Amino acid sequence: RTVPPVVFHLIPWFGSAAAYGGDPVEFFKSCREKYGNVFTFILLGKRVTVALGPQGNDFVFGGKHTVIAAEDVYQHLTTPVFGKDVVYDVPNEVLMEQKKFVKVSLTVEKFREYVGMIEEEMTEFMKGDPAFLIWQMKDINEWGTFDAYKTLAEMTILTAARTLLGREVRESLDKGFADLYSDLDHGMTPLHWMFSDLPLPSYRKRDAAHQKISGFYQSILQKRKRQESEYEDDVMGSLMKQQYRDGRALQDHEIAHILIALLMAGQHTSSSSTSWALLHLADRPDVADALYQEQVEHFGTPDGGLRDMTYEEMRKLPILDAVIRETLRMHTPIHSIMRQVRSDITVPPTLGAPSEDNVYVVPKGHIVLASPALSQMDPKIWKDADKWDPSRWYDADGFAAQAHRQYDEDGKVDFIFSKGTGSPYLPFGAGRHRCIGEQFATLQIGVIISTFVRKIEMRLDQPFPKPDYASMMVIPLRPCQILYRRRKF
Ligand code: HEM
């Protein structure tokens, strides 16, 4: 029984904070070369044991909740932002119930309506945004530019608010409200993860923004209960009708806090994914053309136009599906998935061991960390791993490409992007903390990409942006300008 090797560092408490914070993916790769798939690094006094590869994913995502717990690592970061009594502020069994409440409220009927809502929000946004002036001038064949991340961040919040949070919230999304969201957002950084409370403006603003947003949602709930407001059958409405297993209805503050958590969980994950996808499409006009042709094939009208997309049809577009999968493979927004170790845990020897007759044990008090970003870019698993190539995900029949099929004993195809905890492809996680927003996110990303491809042609006239790891998510480093012109039918 040996503890995993500790990454060499010069300053005791600080440890490898600079290398990890600067570029976690490169840091993990270089540590893997020196120490193998399991190693521990020091991060500002914390001991973090990294478990890499598909087996590392399995170790962390498939670990027993009584032994490794997410809430112990995230609670002090998320509770001030989301609020009390939800997500990591409650025992895991309660989180499981809360996830189920949200899941049942995201129905296929709602998704059908969301397609048109998202498209409408985007068109309205483009009509009002100075960056899209050239798109608005129908007869002008000139190139304009827009900032990929800034545009997609704004579109994501508008479309998520309209769909998930309902009309009352969307209609109040003026500048003041956007600023409040931004204050909440700035309360979710690595600094806030390290120190839950500091006498700094960002902490004060975070707390004030939480109070105001939570109060606003609760006032809408009150109005709905007094039947003073007409409302659609949205997520808030659905949560109002649900009950915990013990028969207790959700309290207003719980509903408000779940809604804040949803918006936060979906905002940067979706906006970074759509930004990266558009940047790649601008860099590869051949793929953008193939996507456009796919739209024409499925939605083309006799007069040369395109009719509205439907949810059912969108799910059957192999090139769009492949563009989303490939973007999430290369630019998975969350690079580190962490859990706190509650009692000593033995590392399976196939993941890593000091010798044939010895095992590694991760002691209680460590954090364990999985990074599917690495297995998703591992050249031993993926052909041309660092090349963005959506065609790896489909063949002429619209199925996943040969290179990424595995065969079980009966010779049946077993796709390696299956949902098990030991898959190398896990952009939405796995196990009990798996994402419940996957279908919504895929729909939102799909409509956003398709709507852009329908409206504009894109090019990149700058080097492809590098990843920016300064926030908790992997977003494109500025500048990330896209050149565009109005598409001619
Ligand atoms: C959990 C990724 C969009 C809500 C997760 C996890 C990942 C993830 C990796 C697992 C975290 C862990 O194991 O600690 C993504 C990506 C998205 C996305 C890549 C978009 C491209 C969304 C959206 C929503 C959402 C739109 C809400 C509508 C959640 C929730 C959890 C979760 C509630 C559960 C957290 C837990 O059980 O601990 N997501 N997500 N996500 N996500 Fe997402």
Image (cartoon, rainbow, N blue to C red):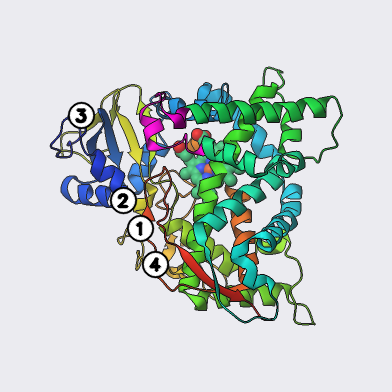
Around disc 2, counting alpha carbons within 10 Å, would you say few (fewer than 14), some (14 to 19), or many (20 or more)? Answer: some
Label 4 sits on a secondary structure element that is: loop
Residue 25 tag number: 2
Around disc 3, counting alpha carbons within 10 Å, would you say few (fewer than 14), some (14 to 19), or many (20 or more)? Answer: some
Label 3 sits on a secondary structure element that is: loop
Residue 150 location, x and y as percent?
A: 52, 55
Q: Is the residue marked 1 within 8 Å of ligand 1, measured from its CB?
A: no
Residue that label 3 marks: 13
Picture quarter containing residue 361?
A: top left
What is the magenta range? 184-203
Residue 464 tag number: 4
Check the picture and name the quadrant holding the C terminus.
Answer: bottom right
Amino acid identity at mark 2: Val
The image shows a total of numbered marks equal to 4
Residues at badges 1 and 2 in contact (C-beta under 8 Å)?
yes
Q: Nearer the viewer, mark 4 or mark 2?
A: 4
Q: Between residues 173 and 368, which one lies in front from this camera angle?
A: 173
Residue 188 magenta? yes
313 shown above or below 200: below
Amino acid identity at mark 4: Phe
> As drawn, is 236 to the left or to the right of 335?
right
Residue 425 location, x and y as percent?
A: 43, 53
- Disc 4 to disc 1, how far (Cα)? 18 Å
Residues at badges 4 and 1 in contact (C-beta under 8 Å)?
no
